[in-house]
Image (cartoon, rainbow, N blue to C red):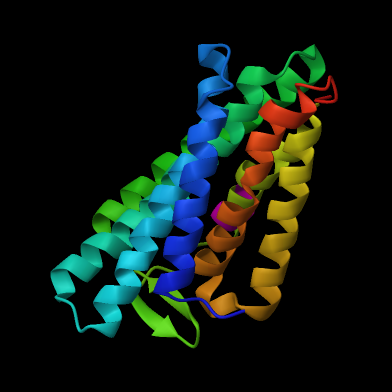
Amino acid sequence: MCFSATASFAVAAGTGVVGTFTLAHVRSARELPLAIVPLVFAVQQAVEGLLWLLLEGGGRDALVGFAATTFAVFALVVWPVLASLAPLLIEARPGRVRVLSILFALSLGLSGYFLVVIIGHPYGVAIAGHSLQYDNGVVYPGLPRLAYVLATCAPLLVSSHRAMRLLGVTVSVGLAVSLAVYYDALFSVWCFFAAASSVLVYAHFAVFRARGLAA
């Protein structure tokens, strides 16, 4: 698969449309964090599309650095919180609520940690083959890396809702593929796959729930 400005903007446009339609199916405020997932990914992919254009066009370092750090904030700060909060707010089974609450607390601490690191060490980015490689000069310890996987994948898998579990499987498989094949550009590639798969959020509202198949 070739990743480029065109691919990033195409996914941004697609997930933006999906996100807009998803919002039309929201019934309560508790569903909003889940419903905005495609829109958040749309913004993130648009930022990456901009980075492609800047890097290929010899853009100014300050603007590239700002956009790269913005992408990192989405990936490391926003996504862990959203991935754990969205399933928690729509969960009705007490046992799963307890587990999701623990994972949400973990995500808050983790996102705070990453935010502090990013403020002190802003990100840069470079083209690596057909994807983008983000780097801030920090080698993260193994514990935060493991916590990140738990915070972003486990809540979706724990959810009692079918579309959330399918999204969790897709995101987890995407992470495994990214680690195995695109390690140097892990966040870029994984976020690309996650954005493309966020159509499952729309499926939760418009297909599974509408037909009584959500759980």
The residue closer to the viewer here, 91 or 145, is 91
Q: Position of residue 54 (x, y in %)?
A: 25, 75
Name the side, left or right, on which 51 lies relative to 92: left
| 15 w.r.t. 103: above or below | below
Measuring 34% from the left and 69% from the top, which residue is drawn there? 136
| 189 w.r.t. 46: above or below | below
- State how many labels appear: 0
Q: Quadrant of the C terminus?
A: top right
Measuring 67% from the left and 62% from the top, which residue is drawn there? 175
Q: Is residue 104 visible?
A: no
For the magenta stretch, what is the residue range?
A: 143-147
Name the side, left or right, on which 199 lies relative to 40: right
The residue closer to the viewer here, 116 or 183, is 183
Q: Position of residue 120 (x, y in %)?
A: 25, 56
Measuring 56% from the left and 19% from the top, which residue is drawn there? 26
Q: Quadrant of the N terminus?
A: bottom right
Q: Position of residue 2 (x, y in %)?
A: 55, 80
| 111 w.r.t. 13: above or below | above
Whether residue 99 appears in magenta in the rendering, the answer is no
The residue closer to the viewer here, 162 or 18, is 18
**Secondary structure mostly seen in the magenta stretch:** helix
Q: Is residue 62 visible?
A: yes
Q: Position of residue 138 (x, y in %)?
A: 39, 68
Q: Residue furthest bottom?
A: 129
Measuring 48% from the left and 35% from the top, which residue is drawn there? 20
| 182 w.r.t. 197: above or below | below
Name the side, left or right, on which 179 lies relative to 42: right
Name the side, left or right, on which 20 lies relative to 106: left
